[in-house]
Amino acid sequence: MKGGRPVKQMTGRRLQERRGLFDLLDDYILLNILERLQDSFDRQAWCLVCKHSLYLEVSCRKKIQLLRSEVLEKVLQRYTNLQHLDLSLCIRVTDASLLSVAKLVGVRLLTINLSKIGGFSDAGLAYLARDCPSILDIDLSYCSNLSDLGIIALAQLSNLQSLKLVGCHSITDAGLGCLAAGCKNLCALNLKGCLGITDAGIAFIAANCKLLHTLDLSYTEVTEKGLASITILDSLKDLNLVACNNVDDNGLEYLRSGCKTLLRLDVSRCRNVSDVGITALADGPMALQQLTLSYCSPITDEVLATFQKFYSLQSIKLDGCEIAGKGLLFIGRGCKRLTELSLSKCRGVSDLGVAAVASGCTGLYKVDLTCCRNLSDVALASLAISCKGLIALKMEGCNLITEKSLALLGEGCPSLEELDFTDSSINDSGLRAIARCPGLRILKVGFCYNISDRGLSHIGASCYNLRDLDLYRSVDIGDGGVAAISCGCQRLKGMNLSYCPKVTDTSLQSISQLRELRQLKLRGCDLVSSAGLSIVASGCKRLVELDIKRCTRIDDVGVLAVAHSCPNIRQINLSYCPVSNIGLMSVAKLSCMQNMKLVHLKNVSGDCFAAALLACGSLKKVKLVSYLRMLLPAGLIEEMELRGCKMRWMEKPW
């Protein structure tokens, strides 16, 4: 615990079982170390040091995320200082489970995440509200069983500050009104997709929750009347109105005149918002810092000219819009504080416009130019020269970029952490230039046909902080490049080598050095085999996601090795692999497995598919070929869906 000893009797305690150097360390030092261990494997290793290290971990643990609800009661009995509980990965949580939480955690519980799970009802929420009065944050997103009765029960939580109800279609104004009357300290409310909510419910919230600073009304039926009611909120800073098709220019006019504290506004996909409403915002007293107009009507010169009045804007997102010829010039002239600009899939973006923004907004550190296919070296060079603090740049599909501007980028922006040049003409010289950015953490160069092992060797030699590498369908990448990355980028957590035909088992032997690897995609790599996958499994024990779809040389031997050595696998794709009943059952029994894709496993029998589905108690998603509907036992599909498992049936030829 920060700032003191977590349990009084723990101070100075020395169990007789402790021996060696560990015994010389004071509990304050041990607890300081323990707080810094965020990775689950590291905490498991800590618990195995000695009985006292286990005691410290159990006594000090305040936050936990469970995969299986059947162990919930035992966990709550063991960890007696828990304050934060995340059950969102469980397949099913019942009212009895929430009753256990209420009894065993009680007033200590501060946050609970129940999103995207089924099994509990309004009664379960009533247990929490009755026995856990200290709850500050609760996430109930996509809990379709909830009704107004559950929300009314939550009204007892007078300390509640944050509530997420995304996709809760059964909630109406009646429930929301009771919630507002009881939870007057509410600061953040997410009602995205709550189609039963109208302007009346929003008025209840505005009248009672005076401290509200974040409100998400995306995909609701709110109109200008609802927006008029929230103008009385003196603390409102974030407002999301994505796809609110009943919101028009009059609604924005109410915001302009009333919401003086608003800092971030998102009106993406609001089809009834026009230039008039956006222009009106610019004349208001609010000091907007972020404005999102993605997929709105064409952004004209007149609209962009008003951006010069948004003197405090730090983030502009215009994804999917049509930008007028010289419109970006106005952003460069007026938005001097701009740090983030997103123009993904915009039409009309030119070198001149990007250069104008770069020269005028030199503080930019995040730029998204995905699929702006008319951009050339001129645009990239202007960013490299003017925006020295750039940390994230996305230019997927920009095929006119060459090594000339990439050299300027590597030299001028040494702080870069994320680069996306997917489906571009980048070559080995470009990778050598990028390698001058030692802080690079994410690199995406999929569909890049001009890069080879030689280029990757530069990345491996310099970018030792790399965490995620995407080489999807970069067909000239082979064992040499993978070896260079594996040797130099030891902290890599994700690697995508799908459809890289030159990758063999030699690459997998190199990858086995990556002890922190979580995600590995080998889809369509015909030259890798079970022998190589077994080596990976022995070295990469922290794997969480594995994709070996269409790896025709990987059979039961490789899958059994993964099941034995990688117990934390949550997602696996075995589609089109020569795996038999033995291999499928081995992964189905993994306690963490939540998502399996099992299309066209021709060596697996119908009975084995049924047994595997029943054996995988934590399964939340499964993809199967449609003809299996006829082969599975009657009632099995219904049972799986009652558990909370989503079954996706594919019509795909072999």
Image (tube, rainbow, N blue to C red):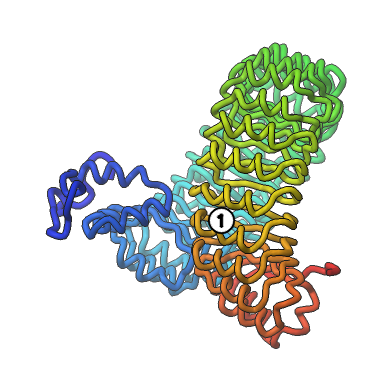
- Which one is in front, 496 or 343? 496
From the viewer's side, name the closer residue of 261 and 605: 605
The residue shown at (28%, 45%) is: 1
**Vertical placement of 221 versus 306: above or below?**
below
Crowding around mark 1 (Cα neighbors within 10 Å: few <14, some 14 to 19, many 20+) is many
- 77 with respect to 407 (left or right): left
Q: Residue at x 52, y 47 (%)?
A: 514
Residue 252 is situated, as x and y percent measured from the top left of the image, at 71, 33
Amino acid type indicated by mark 1: Val
Residue at image location 66% in from the left, 38% down from the top: 228
According to the picture, the residue beneath numbered tag 1 turns out to be: 536
Give the vertical position of 133 relative to 380 (above or below).
Answer: below
* Closer to us: 107 or 424: 424
Regarding residue 51, the answer to whether it shows in the image is yes
In this picture, residue 610 sits left or right of residue 23: right
Q: Residue at the location (65% across, 26% down)?
A: 434
Location of residue 108 (image quadrant): bottom left
Find residue 189 and report its horizontal and vertical position in percent.
55, 47
Q: Vertically, is 95 above or below 412? A: below
| Percent x, y of residue 558 | 60, 65
**Residue 208: percent from left, percent from top:** 50, 45
